[in-house]
Image: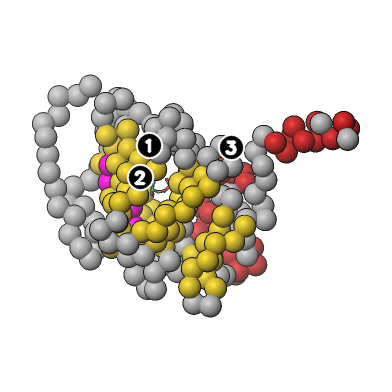
Amino acid sequence: MTDDPPFGFDVRLPGGIPARYDNHIQRRLSALRGQYSDQQAYDAMLALEDTLLYEVYEIRRPPHGGDLSHGVSIVHPGKVGDEYFMTKGHYHAVLDTAEVYYCLRGMGMMVMETPVGDWAVEEMAPGRVVFVPPRWAHRSVNVGRGEDLVMLYVYPADAGHDYGTIESRGFRKLVVERDGKPALIDNPRWAWPDRRSSQQAGGGQG
Ligand code: PAN
Ligand code: ZN
């Protein structure tokens, strides 16, 4: 618990950089190693430049259950092969914590899934809110043409981040460009989390 006084700040468009923030994260292509399905395109792009994919302006709050971390995420436009620029994506370390996103600018997809393999994708456009329920991993994807995807987010300050699960198998669905439009395809690298090992274990029973 802190005794911080209330505060307000502007998020001016089109830039979307909040007038107040505590921390600025920049994530580049090298941070998404292994996440893009077209490895050749990834390697070729990285050889040229470690391109800036997205930025987060964080209003950090102490990890207290009643407090709310928030900020603005900006995913830049572009593709690796035919797969759009996207965030790493994560589960919250405290799995039972939700998040709200509000799209201020651009066109995007929020790709979500649960530890038992349920998945969902919600479109993002200016003025649209997406609610990410507790237990749902989430990744934002910029499907716009040449425009930043700017979103305000709010989540419990004690949620924390678990990146490892997504790093190891990715999301179940990938967002790629097909005939000039975004489309969902299955991620060949993805595998059933728990069932795989239990199927193998039960394989001898016919
Ligand atoms: C967001 C994300 C932000 C960047 O603040 O952290 O969009 O995505 P990655 O953290 O996956 O790199 C959020 O969901 N916080 O919980
Ligand atoms: Zn989150």
The image quarter in which residue 128 lies: bottom left
Q: CA distance from mark 2 to mark 1?
A: 8 Å
Q: Quadrant of the N terminus?
A: top left
The image quarter in which residue 60 lies: top left
Above or below — where is 13 with respect to 11?
below
Give the residue furthest to the bottom.
179
User: Which residue occupies 57% across, 70% down?
Assistant: 81
Q: Does label 1 or label 3 sit earlier along the sequence?
A: 1
Q: Is residue 58 visible?
A: no
List the residue tagged with mark 2: 131
List the residue tagged with mark 3: 116
List the residue tagged with mark 1: 98
Residue type, numbered disc 2: Phe
Q: Is residue 76 left or right of residue 201?
A: left
Q: Is residue 55 visible?
A: yes
Residue count near mark 2 (Cα–Cα under 10 Å), binned few <14, some 14–19, many ≥20: few
Chief secondary structure of the magenta portion:
strand
Q: Does label 2 or label 3 sit earlier along the sequence?
A: 3
Q: Is there a contact, CB below 8 Å, between mark 2 and mark 1?
A: yes
123 magenta-colored:
no
Q: Which segment did they paint magenta?
A: 70-75
Above or below — where is 163 with respect to 5?
below
User: Which residue occupies 48% across, 42% down?
Assistant: 137
Disc 2 on helix, strand or loop? strand
Viewer-closest of 195 and 156: 195
Q: Quadrant of the C terminus?
A: top right
Residue type, numbered disc 1: Ala
Q: Is mark 1 within 8 Å of ligand 2?
A: no
